Amino acid sequence: MSEQDERKRLQVGGQAVIEGVMMRSPGCIATAVRTPSGAIVLQKQCFTSLTRRFRALNVPIIRGAIAFVETFVIAIRALSFSAEKATAEAAAEGGGTGAADAGKGLSSFSIFITIAAAFALGFGLFFYLPLFLTELTGLTQGVLFNLVDGVIRLIFLILYIVLITRWKEMRRIFEYHGAEHKTISAFEAEGTATVENTRAYSTLHARCSTSFLLIVVVVSIIIFMFLGRPQSIGDKLIRFAFIPVIGGVSYELLKISAKPGLRRYMAVFVWPGLFLQKLTTKEPSSDQIEVAIAALNACLGDKIVES
């Protein structure tokens, strides 16, 4: 097998951050950010998932739950770095204390608080509130109750995505989101990504977190149907306890749906997610693609290729 084919076999993921892109390979995480002066700065660190370090954890469902938590932590760290670098020069020019503070980043305690707050907000908005509203309908039949609960949750998700697309400051992040997808697609197809070959690829990608969120909603409806209508606080806590299971099942379905040979069988999961991605991705500029490529090359251990 050629070196290029070996590279194409690597599964790379990523996310858009403030004025940049984070890329993750099986053994490394790299975040590239465009500073106000136009330079690209990088943060690179080795990272091996718990599922790769401990084989007992690398089993269906469990590995998905672990991947969900790890991805969340990595995302917070990448966003912290991008926020520092995207604003550090502006703070320095302003002559305030922001320049000194910008390099500090988030402490471990701050990251923990941020993650806890995000989980609490997510549970409240996408699990507890739909459940509360469904209880107000007076429905008692388990399947129908959970179907209505799931539909409300889906409406909340779509409304949330639509609302953030109205936020003008989010457009830049959506453009970097598109750059991330196009770069990964070019790499997966050709084993390398350049500004020239990346332009030809779509801003949509089957393994996107937007698609994952939609799959989570669908899977939650099915799993909660087996739990029936929650009658007590204990029943509600059991539903919440199943969230890691829902995340794990959704992770497995997302992986399957991304396999070329199985996509037509998984269309019910793939196409709605791709439709939502049309809202969360925008066509990037060449400069933004260059940042995504810098992050990709760094997480693969390559030198940064200037275009």
Image (cartoon, grey):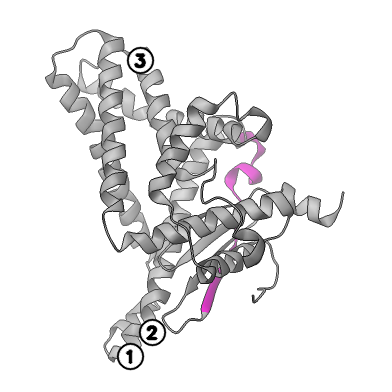
Inspect the image, locate mark 1, and give the three-letter code of the amino acid beneath it. Answer: Glu
Give me the disc on residue 89: 2
Q: Which residue carries the number 1 mark? A: 93
Is 168 situated above or below 152? Answer: below
Would residue 173 be seen by someone viewing this image from the given angle?
A: yes
For the residues bearing labels 1 and 3, Cβ distance under 8 angstroms? no
Would residue 99 be seen by someone viewing this image from the given angle?
A: no
For the residues bearing labels 3 and 2, Cβ distance under 8 angstroms? no
Is 216 situated above or below 118? Answer: above
Image quadrant for the C terminus?
bottom right
Count of marks, rendered view: 3
Query: Observer-nearest residue: 66 or 23?
Result: 23
- Indicate the position of residue 3 as horizontal and vertical percent values: 83, 56
Q: Secondary structure at mark 1?
A: helix
Is 168 situated above or below 211? Answer: below
Sooner in the amino-acid sequence: mark 3 or mark 2: 2
Magenta stretch in the rendered image? 40-56
Q: Which residue carries the number 3 mark? A: 225
Q: Secondary structure at mark 3?
A: helix
